[in-house]
Image: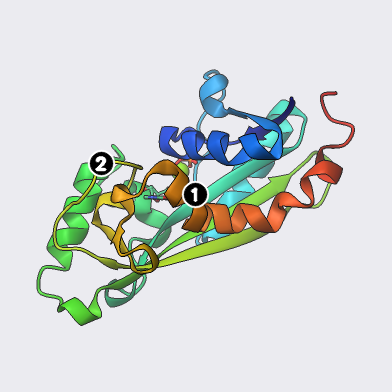
Amino acid sequence: MQEVIIATKNEGKAKEFIRMFKPLGYEVKTLLDFPEIQDVEETGKTFEENAKLKAETIANVLGRMVIADDSGLVINSLDGRPGVFSARYAGIEKSDQANMDKVLSELEQIADNKRQARFYCVLAVAAPGKETFTVSGTCEGVILREKRGSYGFGYDPIFFVVEMDRAMAELKPEEKAQISHRSQALRKLESQLPSLLSGENE
Ligand SMILES: O=c1nc[nH]c2c1ncn2[C@H]1C[C@H](O)[C@@H](COP(=O)(O)OP(=O)(O)OP(=O)(O)O)O1
Ligand SMILES: [Mg+2]
């Protein structure tokens, strides 16, 4: 099977990418398979900037095509927070539980009809000597008042998916893969994968 490198150290993302790429005929490797590679500092102001930064840095380290994912939760009544700070919202330890607790407490006084939010995902494709490009996807929802469900990762337990009438963490992996911001973004990339990867690791 042809190999695709995803420049992520996030186990939840890694699992989703492995599942999404399998039916397309690609085997996914992530930075969890390359523990010697150092963290890329996410200094960008936008998801696009951070996705490009991660993809280009790792493409240069490995000398081959790499896809990076920068994603997060955007909440209307918090002026778009946590946004690009989603992973480290409650501190640099990157705790999903602490991040969710912080959002829940910030929204405690916010009425049910003012809790709209969206997940946003940018995928950047970078290869040495080529121009980097990005695609994006979104998933609309509402922030719950307590955690629900145990699938997924990150903010999934507090994110109610309008389209599915359940919390994201109540969706089985194959259900999340039908509607997620990540799969929306990947769909925009799918048809280009064969040409992007031609000449790589045959
Ligand atoms: O489907 C999702 N379901 C729930 N939460 C999600 C999702 N997608 C992103 N998120 C949250 C997790 C993390 O708090 C942040 C991503 O931050 P982000 O910097 O892109 O990833 P990360 O630091 O965990 O790993 P890495 O940079 O190595 O890919 O947004
Ligand atoms: Mg990150």
Image quarter where the C terminus lies is: top right
Identify residue type, mark 1: Ala
Quote the CA–CA distance across marks 1 and 2.
16 Å
Specify the label residue 154 is tagged with.
none
Give the labeled residue for mark 1: 177
Residue at (50%, 41%) from the top-left corner? 41
Q: Secondary structure at mark 2?
A: loop
User: Where does the image place residue 159, in percent across and percent down from the top left?
Assistant: 29, 59
Residue 92 occupies quadrant = top left
Residue at (89%, 32%) from the top-left corner? 199
In the picture shown, does residue 74 fall above or below 87?
Answer: below
Residue at (75%, 37%) from the top-left corner? 65
User: Where does the image place residue 33, in percent across and percent down from the top left?
Assistant: 56, 20
Ranked by sequence position, the earlier of labels 1 and 2 is 2
Q: Say left or right for 174 vs 2.
A: left
Specify the label residue 150 is tagged with.
2
State whether label 1 is within 8 Å of ligand 1.
no
Q: Say left or right for 139 vs 155.
A: right
Identify residue type, mark 2: Ser
Q: Secondary structure at mark 1?
A: helix
Q: What colour-coding does the image apply?
A: rainbow
Residue at (65%, 42%) from the top-left corner? 67
User: Where does the image place residue 117, in percent across and percent down from the top left?
Assistant: 34, 69
- The front one of 105 and 164 is 164
Q: Residues within 10 Å of mark 2 (few under 14, many from 20)?
A: some
Q: Quadrant of ligand 2?
A: top left
Say whether residue 90 is visible. no
Q: Say left or right for 199 vs 120.
A: right
Q: How many marks?
A: 2
User: Where does the image place residue 120, in percent across and percent down from the top left?
Assistant: 47, 61
Q: Residues within 10 Å of mark 1 (few under 14, many from 20)?
A: some
- The front one of 23 and 124 is 23
